[in-house]
Amino acid sequence: MDFTFCAINVNVTNLEKQLMLAEVLDIPDDLYHENGFRGCRMLGIYNGGGQLGGPVKGRSTSKGQFKYTTAGERCPTIQSVLVEKIFPFMNPIGRVTILRTRAGSGLNVHLDTLENEIGTRQHKYRLVLNGEIDKLFFIDENNKKVFMPNEYNSYVLDGSHPHSIDPANEEKITLCVGAPWHGEDNKLYSNLVKNSNYSIKVSRPTVIDPKWVDPFFKYKTTDENIRA
């Protein structure tokens, strides 16, 4: 499972995607958190409580007893897709967050992990509900952008590899599942990866720009609160 990007087919239908997107668009703006480091809005759907997107006040969102947030309770289709099609290949089950990147505005290049975790297994699952997938890129050893194809809206990426998305005409809305799930081995997940229609390994930059590492990690170096 040594890849940077791997498309996996979890059989989410177009109708399910449409219903999931409608649920997200119906959630009030005041439930979102503005993540200045990544340059997007984040919405907690399923986690362990705490504070999303900043230094922890109380429990971490990736620790403790997981449950659906106020926003997650408003999303029955998202809940059913998670339970029936995504959570079954995860052990442990990951925290679920919606990321929204505004039209005409890309993401900042970033890592979804600590710098000292680069090269360890740090898989992150993504299901794109809206927007252009081929704006996603990874930085290679020559500090060049390597873009992913537009055909695959369900995929796993290496969160320890510097990545971002370029500006697009449409808002990009993505369901993200991360820590405490890191891509741990099990038969179902291994089969999904084995049967992938597209997988790529991108070379890594030789130097990690400090701007790519979330500054909040310096406050809680062992906390996974803000990892998507």
Image (spheres, helix red, strand yellow):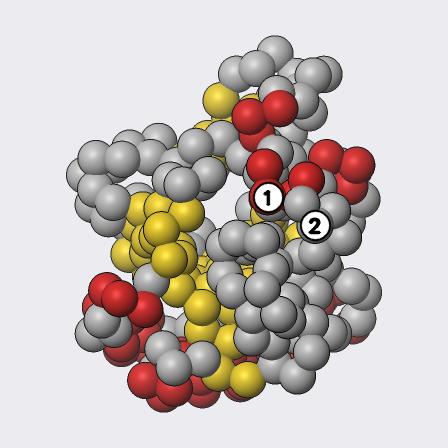
Q: Which residue extends farthest front?
A: 57
Q: Residues within 10 Å of mark 1 (few under 14, many from 20)?
A: some
Determine the secondary structure under disc 1: helix
Q: Give the x, y percent position of residue 55.
A: 58, 53
Give me the C-alpha separation between circle 1 and circle 2: 7 Å
Can you say which quadrant of the picture contains the C terminus? Answer: bottom right
Q: In this view, does 125 lie to the left or right of 152?
A: right
Residue 179 percent location from the top left of the image: 66, 61
Q: In which quarter of the image is residue 90?
A: bottom right
**Which residue is located at x 43 percent, y 32 percent?**
108
Q: Is residue 121 above or below residue 86?
A: above
Q: In which quarter of the image is residue 207?
A: top right
Is residue 178 at all visible to an observer of this figure? Answer: no
Residue nearer the viewer, 59 or 75: 59
Residue at 39% over, 64% down = 43
State left or right for residue 67 relative to residue 94.
left
Give the camera-side residue of 119 and 10: 119
Q: Would you place residue 139 above or below residue 86 in this image?
A: above
**Image position of 58 with respect to 209: above or below:** below
Residue 3 position, x and y percent, is 69, 42
Give the residue at mark 1.
Answer: 216
Q: In this view, does 44 lie above or below 87?
A: above
Instruction: Using the image, tell me which numbered label, if any, was put on residue 220.
Output: 2
Q: Residue at x 31, y 46 (%)?
A: 101
Q: Can residue 71 be seen in this view?
A: yes
Q: Tag 2: residue type?
A: Lys
The disc at residue 74 is none
